[in-house]
Amino acid sequence: MAGSEATAARISNSIPTDIFTVTECVHLPGRIHSPGMWNYFHSGIFSFSLPQFEIQMIVAFLIMQAFHYMLKRHGMPPFTSQLITGLILSSPILGHLKVFRVIFSSKSQELIYVLGFFGEALFVFLSAVKTDMGTMKRMGRKALCTGIACHVSPLLLGYLLYFTLGKSWLTEKMYYKNSFLTAVHSLTSFPVVVYLLEHLRILNSELGQLALSASFVSDLSGLMIMVVSEVVTISSEIGATRAMMTVGSILIYLLLIAYAFRPAMCWVVRKTPEGKPVKGMYIHIIMAIMFLSGLYADYNALPIFLGPLFLGLAVPAGPPIGSTIVSKLNCFTEEVFLPLYVTAAAMKADIRSVTFSDRSITFNVVLFCSTFVAKMVGSLVPPLYYKMPLNDALTVALILSFKGVNQLSVYLCTLMFKGDPREGEPVFSLLTIAILVDALIIPVLVKYLYDPSRKYAGYQKRDIMHCRGNAELRVLVCIHRFANVAAAIKLLEAACLSRERPLGIYVLHLIRLIGRSSPVFISHNKQRTVSSSSSFSENIIIPFERFKQEKKLVGLSVNLFTAITPPKCMHEDICTLALDRLTSLIVLPFHRKWSIDGSLESEDNNIRTLNYNVLQIAPCSVGILVDRGHLGRSMASTESSYSVAMFFLGGNDDQEAIIFAKRLAGNSNITLAVVHLVASETDGDIHIDNLLDFEVLKDVKRNNVGNAYVIYSEEKVEDGPQTAMVIRSMAYKFDLIIVGRRHNIDSPQTSGLAEWSEFPELGVIGDLLASSDVVGSKTSILVVQQQQTDDR
């Protein structure tokens, strides 16, 4: 009926054991926009859907963020806070209050569930798009055995309990539902494991990679079992004919994906120019097919997410298609749709309905706990068999036992949206509480058992100072973009000396992970030719290969790598490679980029965070290279002389920096000037507190650094401001200035400077040289921190 007229709609729901009738007034058409806030205060109800939905979102997200603020410091992902929010808003807690009954009325929740299921379908699709099917080819035996055991052991025990106790403990309907639930209890969801590893920041660790590969195996096998279980359920509830039709429909759908959709996606990739985004038309077509796939799965009585899941696996991971889809949809899906879905699903739980006098509840408690223990044992045995430490093996088992949004979604669909919800509500409430306990305990235990930084602890000296003069100096150079290449090559060119002083160069191209779940690490030296390597690193590989060929030094080796990984995990790849290759120095590009005229061009705070993380856990010395534009430009010049300065105040970092500076001075094209900043009340020759400072300066003072041309001078300064004046006066005279970071060191020469520091990762001297106050300077800076061993 149009306008504001209402009609009584009788809604009847026939159930074999009961018939009930609900009378409800429905306004047709539905009222969406409110004429003003006064309407609510006047009527005491929400008559308009849009403002009600907006208030629901505000209330849910406020509670959610409050809990996440408290729990995130313990390593818990946002999923835990979303689940808690749903339980708090459910009827037994805040839901029984009148104001919350009005805001979250049962009728208004329909919109949340529609958006929630929409978000769940998108989440499953995006997770599948980010999944690299090539992971199976690169998988080791340990991951394969762990993944199979992780799924098979709880599945066998679960079905043993199901067949022995289920008939006598469960009603007929719950007995058939538990067949499917047993398979879900045994499931390890690959997207859920990725989600946990990302939030714990151990995705790139060796343990994280093992858990990732094992979960991929377990998820694939679990998916097949779930489909078989669903077909069996259809056969028992509807009939064998419908079950056979479902199997035929699945096979037809898979054939269409394999022989039509996948080739079409590969055609789109070939048609898209390198470095260019995919045309929007193709993305729209893919999204339309994704929604149709969900309808197709639902029409065949399968879970709606299976259609988008199979379709997403056929989309080529990474750029250009996978990364474009993920960049367009991922943020809104994970930050808006998914939290709403988890909260709304948890609101369906009623903890008052969980009574252990009900044999169905008791059976499900026994089943859940038994499958959890079996999964833990199954995940623990293979790593221990392959000689993994107990703590690490236990951590892998805990990660693989983590349950998230995928399990919650299946529980909700199976128990609340199929059949009589009154019969499934107690079991769903129990399983929701079990998922919450799982989500509260496992992240805390993983964080307690596994510290990824402990493997970087420096039990051996891996720095420049302790590298023998005739030993190979190994340097790891990190590259983010092509603009970093020129300055890095110029620095390495200056460090190349002769066969007697060999140099091992390891170049790591760091690429932000987009459109994939699994990080990728590529060793280009294992490729036969550069052209066979991934095209996204070719512009980085070619200049370093050319540099190696032009130098033609016997003692020079260049090794090239690419890491495609999330920004939060990049430091893991850097430090792991440095540890494996026994490097003495890591060179990182600064997060700011200057143009040739000296003006600031761009900055990336993700790179700054990365540099700080590497400084904290690096297994060797670290250098941050601040390229002001001139260092890279001089690479192609024909200048016969290249001027380098070193400001020395004292301490471990300055000692490391001057050792590296003296190595550069061995190059005949380098002129080195060492400026010793001495406190005015001391005598530089006598009152040097640190004997090592005196030792490293001894040959510089006597100008006895081999055949190098070194100029030594002393500048007496009273305090920090005077030091700043001296340094800034020299900031325009050199091509490169080398300084120590001087981390946690106070001295009269730098008093008061730390308070005005803009970039603490550069130290006070490096910060002075790189600050915006030094206008127009084209002098590049290398800030050196010696390997830290005492703070671990």
Image (tube, rainbow, N blue to C red):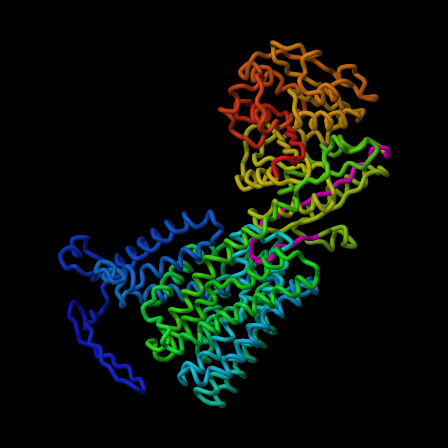
Vertical relation: 650 (above or below) 394:
above
Vertical relation: 2 (above or below) 457:
below
The x and y percentages for residue 483 are 63, 38
**Is residue 59 found left or right of 539 in the rendered image?**
left
Q: Quadrant of residue 486?
A: top right
The x and y percentages for residue 50 are 27, 59
The x and y percentages for residue 363 are 44, 76
Vertical relation: 399 (above or below) 238:
above
Q: Residue at x 61, y 62 (%)?
A: 132
The number of numbered discs placed on residues in the rendered structure image is: 0
Q: Quadrant of residue 584?
A: top right
- Please report the bounds of the magenta region as a residue range: 499-522
Determine if the magenta segment contains residue 701: no
- Foreground pick, 285 / 449: 449
Q: Residue at x 34, y 53 (%)?
A: 63
**Is residue 243 found left or right of 38 in the rendered image?**
right
